[in-house]
Image (spheres, coloured by chain):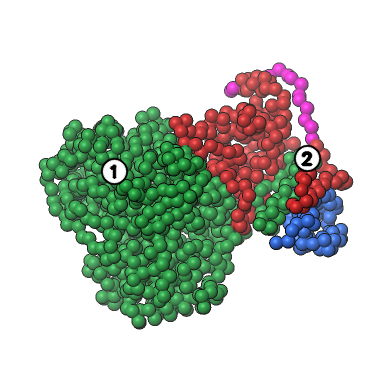
Chain colours: A blue, B green, C red
Amino acid sequence: MPIFSYLAMPIEGAKEALAEELKALSFCEVLPADNVDLLVLVTDAPDEKAQQDLLEQLQKIPSLQSLSMTFGCSDELQPER
Amino acid sequence: MNLDRRSFIKCAAALSAVTAAGSIFPGISFADWKRQEGASGMITWKKAPCRFCGTGCGLLIGVSGDRAVAVKGDPNSSVNKGLCCVKGYHSVQALYGADRITTAKVKRNGKMVEVPIQEALDIVAAKIKETIGEHGKNAVAIYGSGQWTIPDGYVASKLFKGCLGTNNVEANARLCMASAVTGFMTSFGLDEPMGCYEDIDHANVFITWGNNMAEMHPVLFSRMLSNRKLRKDVEIIDFATRSTRSSQAADKSILFRPQTDLAVANAICYEIIRNNWVNWDFVNKNVSFHKGKTNIGYGLEDNFQFTDKEEPLTFEQYKTFLEDYSPEKVEKLSGVSARDIKYMAALYGDPAKKVTSFWCMGMNQHSRGTWINNLVYNIHLLVGKISTPGNSPFSLTGQPSACGTVREVGTLTHALPHGAVANPEDRALAEKIWDLPEGSIDPKPTYHTVEMFRALDRGDIRFIWIQVTNPMVTMPKLTRYRDGAKKEGRFIVVSDVYPTPTTDVADVILPAAMWIEKEGMFGNSERRTQHFEEIVPPQGEAMSDTWQIIEVARRLGFEKQFPWAKEDYIGKIWEEYRRFHDNPKHNMAPYTVLKERPGVQWPFVNGKETRWRYNPEYDPACDKGRDFHFYGQNDNRAWIWARPYEPAAESPDKEYNFWLDTGRVIEHWHTGSMTMRIPVLYNAVPSSYVEIHPDDAADLGVVNGEMVKIISRRGSVTMPASILGRGVPPRGQVFVPFFDERYLINEVTLDSFCPISKQPDYKKCAVKLEKA
Amino acid sequence: MMRPSGKTIGTWGPVLAAVCFLGLGTLQITTAQAATAMIFDQGGEVLYKQYDSTPDNYLATGSGGRNLNSYYALRQYPGSPPRIPHPVEESFSTAPVNCLACHAKGGYSAEYQNFIPVTPHPEKELCTQCHVPLKETKSRFPENRWESINPPKLGRSMLGGSPPPIPHSLQMRENCIACHTGPAAVAEIQIGHAARGNCRQCHVPMVQTEPMKVYIRK
């Protein structure tokens, strides 16, 4: 269950489009800024495989200019309940 | 637990990102609420009365797309002039709780199953028919609410009283305002206050009688505070059984022992007479004196009956009656010093001071509620301080439309939209307007609320439809009535917006459109009717309570009486309803006028609102040439009633040595089904508690937050203690707010009621405490 | 960022990666004008002198640490009454909590190590009517699907360099000075020219939640 957060910067003028495309992906929550062309992206994949797939999908998004990670947490040792 | 931790980590992740962004882009903003998808950012503002208390603030609901997204106070509303309270400002969030009921459910094999709403309505209608067929018309009942809109209550009354011919129509306002109503009817012959909120801008003295106005009618209390700031000669006195925010804000706080308000009110009258402060000109022309029965009981037994017997008194007899109530005698009983009693009496008696008395549940939820209402009117009548700006005995209403719906439409067992079922002319008028054959309406009232739930328990009622209220939290002595509702052979239909302990016992749950999701009107404390349109569409299959009743009525064969179309049914219903009140004492504004204005007071005569009733200067229903005309009673006078002090139904004794008082806090409304789902309100007061005096807590060995078991002869509840919180009871008393369904304090309370009004006393019963 | 010990909870790896981006927005820096012979009207001179005697750090943007994010974090929609971010003693005593003691005039609170926001409506004394504190921090938004619109954008001048219009409605917010000046002001809207006195001489309301009106001659 890796959880990451990123600052997602859209290409010029594509903030809305980027928001839409990111929301369409699974395991993604988007928090757009009010007054700057920037989004916060929080991802919460159920396992490592899904996390890898998600990263690949993110790299393919056309309106995304850059993605910088600001938080990471991975929980391999969480005991099963 | 996993989910909690996960969402906590996600919050931390988001926060990290936001912080990083802030240091890279100074001034960046991520406002802390979820953004509406595709929002244009444009807001249209539509007027509506607030969903919550009886103040009836005018709101402007901010709409973007098909969602309510913001709230402002309506600056055009004379009630609140653009100000709201924390509940009002966040009221629209109550529409969007995640577990909102949006589909109908029916109990099959012990489980609730989703069905299309039309099917559920078929089942409801069929069940009504079946129950009447097997057990007679008085085996079906409808229990509504002071939060019903006026059309909701109107169609309920028309269907059940008119078409089905049963007087099993009641509403939760019986638990809230019934004593106020009987107080008005016995003192004045007509219901509802004679003054209006403008009195606040004229009065010199405000006395709150057992109501925590700073939390319960905060916008009106603020108006009092700003008057005190602007005008130097204003004084506020809080007369209560415990110390609250109102006591803190008041100039003087006077505490009395529970139930002894009866004695203190009489003592004030005693002082007024002794000091010759009686306004003889007023009294001789406008007042007559009366007494009723004494030792009138408490309604604890099933089928308790009481009818009062009125006898006239002379003034001398009234004065003799008051001899038991000298301030010195009352001081011993009430704990209020003779000096304070004389002080209050002097304020009432001073001809230079205009006095407004405010009260609400402290006086209404009282086993002698009718009496104490009479007694405060007595004070104002003796000194002639009534029906003029600033001189106002003002009975505040708790719910947004207890006046508008329950009292004015008459959704109580004995009432009709005009008058009473017992009166042949009133029945004839209803049958005419409702287009029903003569004799359709039953002349005998059946059950008031407590008796209705007793009847359900006994099996005399087999079908009950509950709308916009939560009796499985609010009925006093709750365990009996909840067990009764769950018995075999009882069919419970509940129309509501969120799952509650009442929907938990339902056989059919109908999704209700909430407040601004449907067109309607509310009527507030000062006789102001406020219209609101359907401002946002209802969610899922939610349907207005009015339309639910119309759908069922048509299935029962009453298309003729319920012919209206969905596009304009509310306006048509209003115009039909208005006909009942077509006289200068109660005339109501036409639909078109209601739509234009933030609210219109009744009587609405010749295009003008009557702000002060019974005063010919303001009230066209009065005879000309008089100073006052109390036209409600047959002798054209206001009645002073000699009502004695009688003790509470259950006072503390050796074993159960504490008084239990119940009530509210500003953040939460009633049983919390709406406000607990509003984040800021829930987070401010996340759970209920029991207020205990610090010395009592020390004796009990309990510190703030520790669990205390509250035990009565009916049951027990264990809850956290609040010591020196926002309210502090005196020693020997505890106070519990009832908004939290996890702490059902009504399992502990007693179902005693005022024998005249049948309103239960939620403020007094005996409990003992144990450290849990 | 901390690195807690204990394998039973799981490993945390907070990471602040290097960022590379193109096309940053530019920062604007204003400079003070040279003093010229001044003619004052109304109380302008008093304000002017007051301004001069206020230390620079009090006037500088961001001096108080309160920004748009922390402003909106306390609200549920643009214009809602903020909740109280600091603990409020429920204590009932003869000296009840007096909000105005700090919030009427502002200043610095040693207790909370922060500058105190000034209320734009001190005449309303029953503060708890609209403002409530936060007791529960865990379940901050208990299952409510609340949504609202974007807060207003700042600085929407109609012409380059013209005074930006007031983006919010003035109901309950007529006192510009309370919110726009002083160290407790939200950094992004803090201004340094309060000495001019008559704000609405240059700034007129153009509420952003309403469509712009256009004159059409009938």
How would you classify the magenta stretch by its main secondary structure?
A: loop
Q: Which span is picked out in magenta? A: C28-43
**Neighbour class for label 2 at 10 Å: few (<14), some, many (≥20)?**
few
Does residue B349 show up magenta in the picture? no
SS for tag 1? helix
Q: Which residue is mark 2?
A: B23
Residue B296, percent across and down? Answer: 22, 55
**Neighbour class for label 1 at 10 Å: few (<14), some, many (≥20)?**
many
Residue B481, percent across and down? Answer: 39, 65
On screen, residue C6 versus residue B635, left or right, reads: right
Residue B710, percent across and down? Answer: 42, 51
Q: Label 2 amino acid?
A: Ser
SS for tag 2? helix
Q: Is residue B727 visible?
A: no
Please name the residue shown 17% across and 57% down the image.
Answer: B309
Q: Residue furthest top?
A: C37
Please name the residue shown 47% across and 78% down the image.
Answer: B123
Q: Nearer the viewer, residue B612 or B17?
A: B17
Does residue C31 show up magenta in the picture? yes
Q: Nearer the viewer, residue B617 or B188?
A: B188
Q: Which residue is mark 1?
A: B261
Q: Earlier in the sequence, mark 2 or mark 1?
A: 2
On screen, residue B69 versus residue B55, left or right, reads: right
Q: Nearer the viewer, residue B572 or B287?
A: B287
Protein chain holding label 2: B
Protein chain holding label 1: B
Location of residue B272 by image quarter: top left
Q: Label 1 amino acid?
A: Asp
Please name the residue shown 25% across and 70% down the image.
Answer: B443
